[in-house]
Image: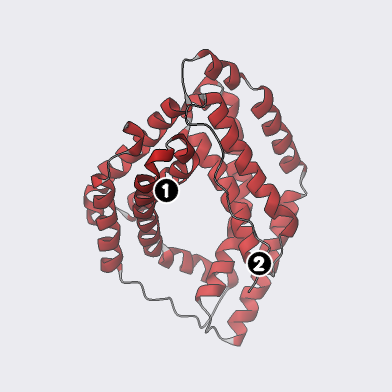
Amino acid sequence: MTTAASKATTSQMRPHASAQRAFMTVATACLAHADANQPHLSIDDPEVLHQFRVAYRRLRSLLSLAREVTKADPEGMRLKVELRELAANFGEARDLDVFLETNPHMSEADHAKIDAARVRAYEKVAATLDSAAWEKWHDSFDRWLDKGKWRKSLGDEPWTGRTMARHALGRRRSRIVGMGKALDELSAYDRHQVRIEAKKLRYGCQFFAPLWPEQAAEISAMEKSLATIQDALGKLNDAATWEHMVALADLDHTDAPHVDEDMQLVRAQNAVNELTGHKPFWRV
């Protein structure tokens, strides 16, 4: 099936770009990624919603990674929280899209229920994008990005983009390595937190890769390990998502997909161990 979806592209910046320039470049790229997909949002093209949602998740990850920005200017934290609340309205439609894709053998009755639930979920997406709250958030974020106090704060600091990235990426890696020493001993909630940290670090590698062009192979290897952590721990969360979708659509005859939890834990643990063995490219 062809799709009108657009994927994120690599930001262009000089290796020794300032922290202000690096942050601005990545944030602008996240917004451009969203803008490229929004006109094509359609229930008939699920990949567009996926990429649209990814764009804003990447933006939220940037705001989490570059915490010096939100510490210097609390308005950034407020906008991040507001975005999370608004973008939550996109999640149900995406979950239903994935459920439909991964459960192709549903009964005709259950398929009809999922179709009806998807229509309602996509209506919620459209209502959010047409809302005054969404428009206000975008106006506020654009203004903050262009003239917020964070710009002066980063401008006053003798920081380069590399310095900011070292702090951001180092923190996330330490959390994953620390929490991931024995994944089988963690609660489902804590494993989910490891997955979130892996996602943010993977996005961070993509954001700041242009600052270390000579480390492309090392960055790619780290991204691969992080993607495996995300995928394996995500499969462990599939059962909870399945139960939520069944309740949401009031399904009757759909069996939960089998997940080999032991195998996925081994995959995730091996990937964490790989990550621990990768030399952090930002330390060169």
Q: Is residue 29 left or right of residue 179?
A: right
Do we see residue 82 in this rendering?
Answer: yes
Look at label 2 and name its amino acid: Thr
Residue 115 is labelled as none
Residue underneath mark 2: 3
Q: Quadrant of the C terminus?
A: top left
- Toward which corner of the image does residue 151 lie, by quadrant? top right
User: Where residue 22 appears, x then y in whole percent?
Assistant: 54, 31
Q: Which residue is mark 1?
A: 196
Answer whether residue 186 is visible to the viewer in this image. no
Most distant residue in the bottom direction? 108
Mark nearest the camera among 2 and 1 is 2
**1 lies above or below 180:** below
Image quadrant where residue 73 sits: top right
Residue positioned 36% across, 48% down in the render = 217
Q: Is residue 140 left or right of residue 167?
A: right
Location of residue 262 in the rendering, given as x and y in whole percent from the top left corner: 25, 67
State the quadrant of the N terminus. bottom right
At a point 50% along the width and 23% down the height, the residue shown is 71
Secondary structure type for disc 1: helix
What element does badge 2 sit on?
loop
From this viewpoint, which residue is outermost toward the top? 156
